[in-house]
Amino acid sequence: MSILRTTLRSATIAVAAVALTGCISLFPKTKPAGLYRFGHAAVESSRPVTDKNFGVFKTPTVFTRAAMSDRLLSVTNGQAAYISDARWVSPAIVLFDEAVARAFEAEGSQARLVTRGEALKAAMALRLEVRSFETDYVDGPKAPPQVLVEIRAVTTRSNDRALLGDKVFVARVKAADNRLSAIIPAYDQAVGQALSEIVDWVGETGAKLPAS
């Protein structure tokens, strides 16, 4: 009887060892994804340094679903895919909202973004809809791609919600090379260009409003 128990115990240990070995083989070491960010390049404005003349309440950003996460979207001949071994440090929609805040904090902006608690003090509301945020391989999968950022901006007057403006801003920046080290700066440039134009446009719209 003791021999049988010993044999069963040995068999059980052997099976467990084989199972454990199998589990280890199911999780091979993989190359960690590189982490990147955008929106930290200085936003240039055509306006001189000025005081913040009016408040703007920005509603929650609408972001294209395919690109709102931490994955980098690419498009080649109409086929969409995510760039392997690359991630944004935070979801793209989060990095975008941070870039918007920095753009309006810049010295050339006449507008100041207000918090939800200050919404009643805002002269207008701003809605941003990011329609495209992607790496476009327009010249083939091996050629340097273009970064496309397309944003629809809508402004409404706060007191009666009357439409003040509705405009689409498009920025295309070609990367210097088909490498992430060149593609990421192209995102910075495209985002900076689009937001600079939006900040100036909001300033021009706000300047036409009657003084409160």
Image (cartoon, grey):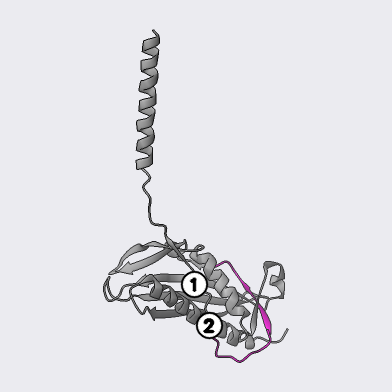
Q: Which residues are magenta?
A: 43-61
* Residue type at numbered disc 1: Phe
Badge 1 element: loop
Main SS, magenta residues: loop
Above/below status of 190 relative to 7 = below
- Residue 49 lies in magenta, yes or no? yes
Relative depth, front residue between 15 and 95: 15
Q: In the current view of this chain or complex, which residue is farthest to the bottom?
A: 48
Helix, strand or loop at label 2? It is: helix
Rendered image: mark on residue 187: none
Q: Which residue is mark 1?
A: 38
* Residue 196, label in figure: 2
Lateral position of residue 72 relative to residue 105, left or right: left
45 over 80 or under it: above or below? below
Amino acid at dot 2: Ser
Q: Quadrant of the N terminus?
A: top left
- Tell me the crowding category of disc 1: few under 14, some 14 to 19, or many 20 or more residues within 10 angstroms, Cα based: many
